[in-house]
Image (spheres, helix red, strand yellow):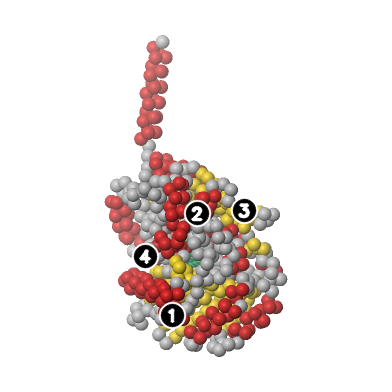
Amino acid sequence: MMDSFIHFYSTIIFLSVLVLINTQSDPLSTLESTIISHGGQVLRITDPQYKAAATLHNRAIQTWPELILRPATHDDVLLALLTLSSLRIPIRIMGGRHSYGGYCSHQGIVLDSALLKDLKIDWETETITMDAGIIWDDVYRVLNGTEYVIMGGLCPTVGVVGFTLGGGYNAMYSRSYGFASDNVLKFKVALYNGSVVTASSEINPDLYWALRGGGGGNFGYVLQMTQKIHRINETHMPNGQFTFLNITWINVDIKIALNNWLAFLKEVADNDIRISFNVIVAVNGESNFLMMYCSFNGPSIEIDTVFNPWLLKDPKPTFNSMFNYTQNDISRVLAIPFPVVNREHVLSAMAINITEAMLDIILDFQPNSTADVGSWTELIYLHSATKDKNTAYAFPDISFDIAPGVSWRNPDNDPYAIDMSEKFLQKLIDAAAPTKSIVGAYLNYIDPYLPNWQTMYYRHHWDRLREIQTKWDPTWYFRFPQGIPPYNQQSNAYKLPNKNSMVIISSFIMLVWFY
Ligand SMILES: Cc1cc2nc3c(=O)[nH]c(=O)nc-3n(C[C@H](O)[C@H](O)[C@H](O)COP(=O)(O)OP(=O)(O)OC[C@H]3O[C@@H](n4cnc5c(N)ncnc54)[C@H](O)[C@@H]3O)c2cc1C
């Protein structure tokens, strides 16, 4: 009797201790050990993999997170969201790390998709299902040698989800097949509270609408998405090849060359969606440079008839080369090494047309000769891109994304380089004002300094997007400076609990460690 009494009480004491240990165990530590036990990673500044994992494409916006969580399973992403949101610990979602505004990172906890790499192609339905950690390079490699293309970016290291949520144009094919966001059939989305939902035209259509162009980092964490792929069948070439022209003018009267091009667009290309252009204009003192990447998604036998009347005009191109490329070839030819060592500031003006007054401004975009800053303007031709008009992307009517950029190395030049490009954008907008040619800015070229960014990025969609955010993320857990706030939310609801000192200490350790 005495024995069973002692046994009973010792069991009670043992269980109480267990409960005490459990309730006192830090949920963040439990989360970290769960992620690690399922093949994921937890990276702090002292880990050898930390620096490569935290490095952003653009050095000008680099921040170093206190902690990077890399779950290896969807369930662990859900657990991370449930744990962190109930602790009211803010996060950022990290994909391919190409956000020009650096919104995939901050000084707190980052939930990084890098290990979520599942990818499946269904040839029958001509669709591909991709996890959040897939970058375009992963997709181009598996499609290479087939007759299929996908609406991905020219830069192979951009993340598929971040790209698609902002709209996602492919400068070579979007006129034929639409934007990435037009091609998504289904999203699998993790919500702030760790639950998971599907968004498609039939299930949760409001979320589906918002995710197609409403921008990365809002609404929820996209775990996976299914997109259409397209068979290139009009070029009559093997393996999904099409004609790629590289047409370059150096030190000619660049305004005449650009006007000839604009006339060609009006007379021919506007009505022929097989033709696409990505144009780079760089003017520097006495020298100038105009380079056009052009794709022709039709039989090469037609090339001379289509292009010669324009290309034989003066000034004739300095170089004019033609290649048969696959999508994978193009991404290799145009690949921008990642991580780049430069600092960058890239902007966007969504334009219905390019007027003479706008051309004059574009041709005057050059840094002060003593500044060690390079500048260029990219003109992406998107006239009549095959767009689904029922998405959150707000610019089905534009013909060009005019994207000025500057690049420099010395951090001392940050204020000058950023100021010069922001002033350029304002001058361009002013020049376009009488003709109402510029109607906004492209969300994928997100600009932390853009005034009126709500209407510039979203136009008339702003209120609807806020309503959808209110429904799916009512506490505004997925938050960043240019994110979409739900109604009735204070902007400072989430704060890092007592973490500021950690940030200062970790920044100090980082400085000592790196340099
Ligand atoms: C060199 C270069 C070339 C580019 N070329 C093109 C182009 O041809 N066409 C084009 O349209 N754009 C282009 N872009 C812009 C690019 O599409 C955007 O910067 C895009 O947001 C990058 O996505 P990411 O995943 O690589 O970046 P990240 O910085 O990791 O993410 C971008 C945003 O999406 C959010 N996000 C990432 N993953 C998820 C997820 N799983 N769920 C929810 N939110 C998420 C992040 O929090 C962040 O706010 C280019 C950018 C660069 C730097």
Q: Which residue type does callout 1 highlight?
A: Ala
| Residue at position x 48%, y 76% in the image | 354
Question: Which of the two marks, 1 or 4, is nearer to us in this view?
Answer: 1
| Residue at position x 55%, y 70% in the image | 383
Q: CA distance from mark 3 to mark 4?
A: 41 Å
Q: Tell me: 218 left or right of 495.
A: right
Q: Is residue 133 visible?
A: no
Q: CA distance from mark 1 to mark 4?
A: 22 Å
Question: Which of the two marks, 1 or 3, is nearer to us in this view?
Answer: 1
* Mark 2 Cβ and ligand 1 under 8 Å apart: no
| Residue 357 numbered tag | 1
| Residue 120 numbered tag | 3
Q: Check the image and report above or below for 216 versus 192.
A: below
| Residue 451 numbered tag | 4
Label 2 vs 1, first from the N-terminus:
2
Q: Around disc 1, counting alpha carbons within 10 Å, would you say few (fewer than 14), some (14 to 19), or many (20 or more)? A: some
The percent position of residue 233, horizontal first and vertical second, equals 69, 67
Callout 4: helix, strand or loop?
Answer: loop
| Residue 210 numbered tag | 2
| Residue at position x 57%, y 78% in the image | 266
Label 1 vs 3, first from the N-terminus:
3
Q: Around disc 4, counting alpha carbons within 10 Å, would you say few (fewer than 14), some (14 to 19), or many (20 or more)? A: few
* Mark 3 Cβ and ligand 1 under 8 Å apart: no
Q: Is residue 259 visible?
A: yes
